[in-house]
Amino acid sequence: MTQYCRTSRNALTLVEMLVVLAILAGLAGVMVPIFTNTRSDSAERTTKASLVAIRDALTHQWVDTKYVPLDDGTGTPATAAEQTERFQIRWLFDSPVSGMSNSDFDPDTRIGWNGPYLASFTGRYSLDSASNFDATYGAANDPAILDSFTASPIVVQVVGTTSPCDVRIVAAGADGELDISPAAATADLVPEGGSEPVGDDIYVSTVLR
């Protein structure tokens, strides 16, 4: 009687392994850009939502406090913030008059700080002149709202010192560096390469009267 020997194969040949690896490498080449783009899109959406929330909070705070005189540099009246600091992020959490988080709103006159105007801050401001985060936007360790790109602080730029105020809330984008000049009027901002470059910064703006 003729007997047949059956052999079982439990391993891949070298050629089969190379084919599998080539398929996996191809899938990785497709999926990595998709994953990267998805993360970037998510960071942009989340950051834009933060910009809008800050804009709305600043508008609310301005309505309450625009008639409150702040220190003009002479020390009279004595307040925690000077006029030039009025729109720094920290004053959404602390009163620019007292420097504390206690409301000083007068319900009769409807004037005064009635915050906090945001539920909570997400980080602390850090000075980084190389990335254009200077004392214009706050002091080291001030309460800050961080963007979703590189966890850089979102800043407020105010063009001019008189009403109406051209106010811009700016996030530094994926490179973590502020490209928009704080002196540039919002109406003059153009894509990178123009007279007032934006780079990869994203922003929302408003006019406070």
Image (spheres, grey):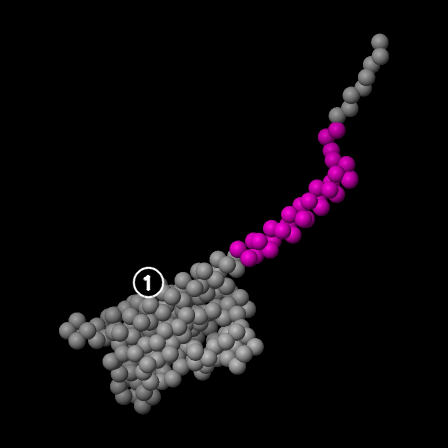
Whether residue 138 appears in this view of the structure is no
Can you give x and y, in whole percent of width and height, for residue 121 in the image? 38, 65
Identify which residue, 94 or 185, lies in the foreground: 185
| Dot 1 amino acid type | Ala
- Specify the segment rendered in magenta: 9-38
Q: Quadrant of the C terminus?
A: bottom left
Q: Is residue 165 above or below residue 12?
A: below
In the rendered image, the residue lying farthest to the bottom is 74
x then y, percent, for residue 56: 33, 68
Q: Which residue is mark 1?
A: 119
Tell me the residue at 73%/42% (across/down).
19
Q: Is 127 inside the magenta-drawn segment?
A: no
Query: Is 204 positioned to the left or the right of 7 in the image?
Result: left
Q: Looking at the picture, how far across and down is residue 192, in whole percent?
A: 55, 75
Residue 24: in magenta span: yes
Residue 57, x across and y down, in percent: 32, 68
Q: Residue at x 69, y 44 (%)?
A: 23
Q: Quadrant of the N terminus?
A: top right
Q: Main secondary structure of the magenta part?
A: helix
Please give the name of the residue rendered at 29% of the width and 83% of the height, measured from the top-left corner: 70
Query: 106 and 196: which one is in front?
Result: 196
SS of the residue at dot 1? Answer: loop
Does 128 sit above or below residue 150?
below
Q: Quadrant of residue 5?
A: top right
Residue 142 versus residue 27 in the image, above or below: below
**Residue extending furthest toward the right:** 2
